[in-house]
Image (cartoon, rainbow, N blue to C red):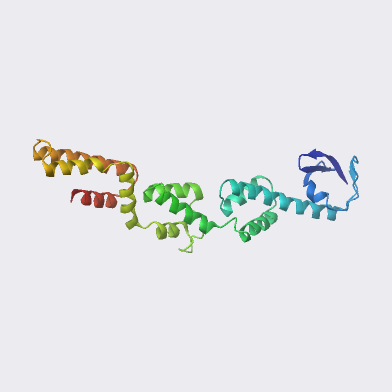
Amino acid sequence: MIYKVFNIKKYYLFKDENNNSYKILKKIFDQYETGYKKGEEILNLDEDFFNEILKESMFLDGYEISLKSIMKRRKTQNQVYENLIIKGYDKEIISEIIEKLKSEGYIDDLSFIEDFIEYQKNEKLLSRIALKRKLFYRFGKKFGDENDINFSIEGIFERIYPQEDEIDIAFKLLHKYNKLEKIKKLKNDKKEKYYEIEENNFDSLINEEILNIKKFLSSKGFSYKTIYSILKLIKI
């Protein structure tokens, strides 16, 4: 026997004779002819019918909760799954919710991770090491399919951010923080002899700035190969 307890915002809360609780969306429950009248404490309803209503409510509730969460911040399939598991949803219902969200385009793991890498690379100007660290922290190393190079986290990363792209990113970062301006000025001054300073002093100042750039790029996680290439180009 099902006992109706009270209203909780958008839900009806029920309990059975074993004190098990059931939360059902009002908009789901009210659309059925249950025979329930306001004020009654006992719900005379077939158990199978009640379970059907309960399942429908759980599906819609889980879907709406997940969609609201996704609209606030994009989520992977696994993140949606884990969130619903924590909230106590049945695995079968979770699978149905995820399939609906995927079919509607709200969950697209491949697109999500591609966009994430592109943004961190081109807008945040992260080094490969820094981006990969952030990538694993956000998605985990088991994201995607490790057996499919096109959909493994390593495969996607290497495709979007190959080693040769890091030089361009490093240069953009140096320009962003005006790290090349002083060297450029020193080289011009040396060439034009604008200051009456010995040539060796110019070289010493330039080398000092080059060392600062090396330290800066190293602190950002850029590889030795990238730093070496940058310094070689700067010295030309």
Q: How far across and down, in percent of the image, does residue 96 sit?
A: 68, 58
Q: Nearer the viewer, residue 135 or 47?
A: 135
- Horizontal side, residue 219 vs residue 61: left or right: left
Q: How far across and down, in percent of the image, does residue 165 sit?
A: 34, 56
The answer to whether residue 208 is above or below residue 155 is above
Q: Nearer the viewer, residue 192 or 35?
A: 192
The quadrant in which residue 197 appears is top left
Q: Nearer the viewer, residue 106 or 43?
A: 106
Q: How far across and down, in percent of the image, does residue 60 sit?
A: 72, 52
Q: Which of 172 and 224 is in front in this view?
A: 172
Q: Tell me if residue 142 can be seen.
A: no
Q: How far across and down, in percent of the image, does residue 47 sit?
A: 85, 53
Q: Which residue is drawn at 86% across and 42% down?
A: 3
Q: Residue at x 10, y 40 (%)?
A: 193
The answer to whether residue 214 is above or below residue 53 is above
Q: Disc count in the image?
A: 0
Q: Residue at x 52, y 55 (%)?
A: 112
- Horizontal side, residue 140 vs residue 229: left or right: right
